Each structure stands twice: as structure tokens, then as C-alpha cells.
Image (cartoon, helix red, strand yellow):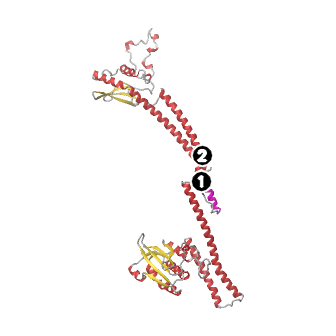
């Protein structure tokens, strides 16, 4: 079943159940409210009886005149309810017992002449259970006259004489209505409620289907777009002009398509660059070997050494590619421990100065690391071998591409916002255009478009540096140096 039909059935079923429950609840509420209204109305109608009972108590100084006198009590109530809607259903008092002397004999000539009105009281049917019962209770709640049944609920009206409660007039509460205009009103309202319920269900039916379509249509559009992505069509975009989550999802989809397109372009460029980098030394090596085989070049140690240099260049390139690929898949291993940064640098300064001096570059260190080791130690959690590789790649990059005469190494401790150390390498060389700064750490990126082997390099050294710094939870970036050349900054966390 399609999601559109599922959503429609869910919405319609829920609405149908809700409408039925509301109709039943309203019917119960109307019925209960009408019963409470009738009970209250009857109590109001019998208030004059409470006043008359208070007068009787005041005149007789007690309930002696009412005790056991059901006819008198009944007459008070019937007189008050005469002509009232409650009057026809209130004959619920015990009938007066006829004296024994007035009863006809069971045997004899008069026995056959008994009429219907001479039936004994036991033959009379009791009043229905829904009929109201009335009772007069004294101040202690004891029955004086009337009917007071334990299983019924009563509304009690206090009878006060001179501010003192002397008794209670109790009227039983109805639990339901069986006749009268109230019942007709309830039945009429129930019919109206079911009619309204049917209209509401029809309205729900008309609304839920287009609503389900409105909710599902963006999913269909995005599903078609995802199918395009799986087919490699990264140029397909989804334009949902909505302000809800579907609108945000469409924007995320478009961002995903753009990212995938950029990654595909990078992948193609990566493959093209790798093939170019590998093809060049292989072609040179093959040419030199073929020239010696064809005796175009003599087979001398000099020519063999030239071919060997190409093999070494090819080997370094393959090793760099392997290292970079390992970094991308997280296979570069790190053995980290607490290291003192200035001490790590101080142990390699002589080697760095030797490298730079052979290229005609002077190394300046600020401040003097030898004094920093004892005065201000900087502890970091790092792999010392990878740190040496990081610094050597940056220095080799300056030697090969900067054409500088001076390189400055600066170490600066930063307290705010976090306790970090900033390591900066700045040269006074030719520098790099601003458009290249953001791409220097990408795979196989070279500023020299001609990709000259002597000046362009393979473009892998700085990319490896980025992976090493990222593995140490640090940052690395490039910018214009104050000396006029290129500045590479590294920020690491201090323990």
C-alpha cells in the first residue's frame, strides 16, 4: 500500500473514531445535564412544602402531628405539585390501611360482591423504581414520615425554625428520564448530534485526502531526486517552496547534490593528477633506458645514476600517495604521549638549519628555544615522529617553492580562549596569490599550473601536514606573511 493511502486511512480512521466518541460523550453529557436540571427544578418546586413543614413544627412544637401520617404528608406534596409536570408520577406513598372492622369478610354472602376497589393493599403494584420518593427526617436524620430508601440518593432541604435546623425534607434524585418533554428533547438532540457527526465525517473525508496528498507530494519529489542521485545525475535540484521540514529537506538535498558533484570533480582531478604524476617519472625512466639500450646514450654510471634518480623520485611519490591514502582512510598510526614542544624543536634545529643553509636560507627562531625549554615548558600530547614529519614537510616546501632567503620560526603560547600554542613558519619569498591560499592543503594541488617537476612538486606534502595536524586535534592554515612571503600557522592544544 502506498504511503499516500496509508496516511489517508490513518487520518480518516482517527477522525472517525474521534467524531463518534465526541457524539457519544455529548449525548451522555446532555442526558446527565437534563437529569440534573429536572432534579433541581423539582426541588425548587417543592420549596413551599419546606415552609409549610416549618410552620407545622412551630405550631406543634415537634413532629408529633406528622409522625406516621402519610396521607397528610402526601396531601402537602400533592397540593403543591397540583397542575405541575411532576404531579402525575408522585403517587408513591404507602396507601392508608383500612381498619379491620371496615374490611368485608372473606367468607359468606358478601364475599362474591367484592369489587376491584376492595382488593387488599398487597395486590397493588409498587411504584416504578424511577419515581421519586419523599421523606421527612428529623434533626438527627431519622425518618419521621415518607419513604427513605438506602439505595437512593436524596436532595435534602433543611427545615429551619427560629434559626435552628429541626429537620430535613428529602427528595430522591432521578438517575434517568423515561417520559415528559425532557425525554423528547434528549432524543431530538441525539438525532441532531448523529446528523452533525455524519456531516463532520463527510467533511473529514473531503479534507483528509487532499491533506494526505499535500503531505506526501514533497516526499515523492525528493524520492525522484534521490533516484537521480543514484544514477549519477548531481545537477538535478529540488525546489520545494515550503517553510516546513520538507522545505529544509529540499535545501539539504540540494546541498548534498552540490557536495556530491564537487566530490566527483575532485575524484576525477585526483585520478588525473595521480596518473600524470606517475606517468612523468616512468616516461623519463623508460626513455633513458631505451636510449641506453639503443646505444643512443652510452651505458655509463652517470646515465645509470640518472635513471636511478628517477626510480627514487617515483618511489617517493608512491610512498607519499600511500601515506596520504592511509590518512584518508584513518590507517595512519600514531603513538602519542606527553612531549615538551620546545624540546622537540630544539633537538631538530641543527638539522633544519643545515637543510636551509644548503638552499641559501637563514633560519631565525623567536623566542630562543633553548631558553624556553627551561623557563616556559609547553606540554602537548603528540606523536614525536609525526611532528618531525610535519615540520620537515613545511621546511621542504619553503626550500623548493618559496625562493626565500630567510625563514622565521615563531612559538607563541595562547591563553584565551583555550590554552594552546601557535607555531608559525614565515618566509620572505615570492609568496602565493590569495586565490591559492585556501587550496594549498588539498590533494595534489600545485600553484604552478604547468606542473613543472622542478618548481611545481607533487602537491602532497602540505596535504599530509593537514592530516597530521587534524590527528592531533589542531588547526593549520596559510596566509600572507609579514615578511612578504608565505606564512603557515599551526595551533595545537596544550595539556
Instruction: Give me the residue at 57% from left, 74% from top.
Output: 324
Q: Give the quadrant of residue 229.
A: bottom right
- Left or right relative to 73: residue 229: right
Q: In this view, does 439 lie above or below 141?
A: below
Q: Is residue 333 visible?
A: no
Depth order, front residue of 326/416: 416
What element does badge 2 sit on? helix
Q: Residues within 10 Å of mark 1 (few under 14, many from 20)?
A: some
Q: How crowded is mark 2: few (under 14 residues within 10 Å), some or many (20 or more)?
A: some
Residue 430 pos. (x, y %) = 54, 80
Residue 466 pos. (x, y %) = 52, 74
- Left or right relative to 307: residue 182: left
Please name the predominant secondary structure of the magenta segment in the image. Answer: helix
Q: Is residue 255 above or below residue 491?
A: above
Residue 233 pos. (x, y %) = 64, 62
Residue extending farthest to the top is: 109
Q: In this view, does 92 lie above or below 105?
A: below
Residue 409 pos. (x, y %) = 47, 80
Q: Tell me the quadrant of the picture where the C terminus can be found.
A: bottom left
Sequence-first disc among 2 and 1: 2
What element does badge 1 sit on? helix
Depth order, front residue of 46/147: 46
Identify the mark at residue 209; answer none if there is no mark.
Answer: 2
Instruction: Give me the residue at 65% from left, 78% from top.
Output: 279
Depth order, front residue of 392/155: 392
Q: Mark 2 and 1 residues: CB-CB less than 8 Å, in contact?
A: no
Depth order, front residue of 269/301: 269
Identify the mark at residue 218; answer none if there is no mark.
Answer: 1
**Magenta highlight range:** 220-231
Identify the mark at residue 349; answer none if there is no mark.
Answer: none
Amino acid at each position: 500500500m502506498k504511503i499516500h493511502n496509508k496516511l489517508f486511512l490513518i487520518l480518516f480512521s482517527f477522525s472517525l473514531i474521534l467524531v463518534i466518541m465526541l457524539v457519544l460523550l455529548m449525548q451522555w453529557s446532555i442526558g446527565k445535564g437534563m437529569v440534573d436540571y429536572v432534579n433541581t427544578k423539582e426541588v425548587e418546586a417543592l420549596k413551599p412544602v419546606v415552609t409549610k413543614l416549618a410552620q407545622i413544627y412551630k405550631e406543634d412544637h415537634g413532629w408529633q402531628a406528622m409522625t406516621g401520617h402519610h396521607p397528610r404528608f402526601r396531601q402537602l406534596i400533592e397540593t403543591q405539585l397540583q397542575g405541575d409536570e411532576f404531579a402525575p408520577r408522585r403517587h408513591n406513598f404507602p396507601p392508608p390501611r383500612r381498619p379491620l372492622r371496615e374490611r368485608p369478610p372473606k367468607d359468606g354472602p358478601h364475599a362474591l360482591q367484592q369489587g376491584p376497589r376492595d382488593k387488599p393493599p398487597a395486590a397493588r403494584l409498587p411504584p416504578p423504581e424511577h419515581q421519586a420518593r419523599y421523606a421527612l427526617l428529623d434533626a438527627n436524620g431519622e425518618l419521621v414520615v415518607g419513604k427513605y430508601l438506602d439505595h437512593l440518593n436524596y436532595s435534602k432541604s433543611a427545615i429551619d425554625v427560629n434559626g435552628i435546623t429541626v429537620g430535613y425534607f428529602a427528595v430522591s434524585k432521578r438517575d434517568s428520564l423515561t417520559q415528559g418533554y425532557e425525554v423528547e428533547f434528549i432524543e431530538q438532540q441525539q438525532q441532531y448530534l448523529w446528523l452533525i457527526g455524519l456531516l463532520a465525517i463527510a467533511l473529514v473525508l473531503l479534507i483528509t485526502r487532499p491533506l494526505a496528498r499535500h503531505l506526501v507530494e514533497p516526499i515523492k519529489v525528493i524520492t525522484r531526486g534521490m533516484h537521480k542521485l543514484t544514477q549519477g545525475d548531481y545537477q538535478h535540484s529540488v525546489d520545494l517552496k515550503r517553510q516546513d521540514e520538507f522545505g529544509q529537506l529540499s535545501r539539504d538535498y540540494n546541498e548534498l547534490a552540490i557536495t556530491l558533484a564537487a566530490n566527483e570533480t575532485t575524484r576525477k582531478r585526483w585520478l588525473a593528477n595521480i596518473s600524470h604524476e606517475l606517468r612523468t617519472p616512468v616516461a623519463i625512466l623508460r626513455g633513458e633506458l631505451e636510449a641506453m639500450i639503443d646505444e643512443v646514450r652510452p651505458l655509463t654510471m652517470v646515465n645509470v645514476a640518472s635513471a636511478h634518480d628517477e626510480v627514487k623520485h617515483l618511489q617517493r611519490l608512491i610512498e607519499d600517495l600511500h601515506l596520504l591514502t592511509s590518512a584518508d582512510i584513518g590507517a595512519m598510526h600514531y603513538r602519542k604521549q606527553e612531549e615538551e614542544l620546545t624540546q622537540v624543536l630544539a633537538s631538530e634545529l641543527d638539522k633544519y638549519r643545515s637543510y636551509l643553509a644548503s638552499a641559501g636560507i637563514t633560519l631565525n627562531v623567536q623566542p630562543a628555544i633553548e631558553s624556553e625549554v627551561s623557563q616556559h615548558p609547553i606540554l602537548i600530547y603528540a606523536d614525536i615522529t609525526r611532528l618531525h614529519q610535519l615540520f620537515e614537510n613545511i621546511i621542504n616546501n619553503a626550500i623548493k617553492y618559496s625562493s626565500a632567503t630567510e625563514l622565521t620560526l615563531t612559538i607563541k603560547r595562547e591563553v584565551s580562549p583555550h590554552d594552546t600554542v601557535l607555531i608559525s613558519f614565515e618566509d620572505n619569498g615570492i609568496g602565493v596569490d590569495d586565490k591559492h591560499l585556501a587550496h594549498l592543503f588539498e590533494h595534489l594541488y600545485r600553484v604552478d599550473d604547468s606542473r613543472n617537476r622542478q618548481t611545481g612538486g607533487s602537491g602532497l606534502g602540505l596535504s599530509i601536514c593537514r592530516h597530521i595536524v587534524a590527528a592531533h586535534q589542531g588547526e593549520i592554515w596559510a596566509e600572507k606573511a609579514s615578511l612578504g612571503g608565505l606564512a603557515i600557522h599551526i595551533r595545537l592544544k596544550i595539556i
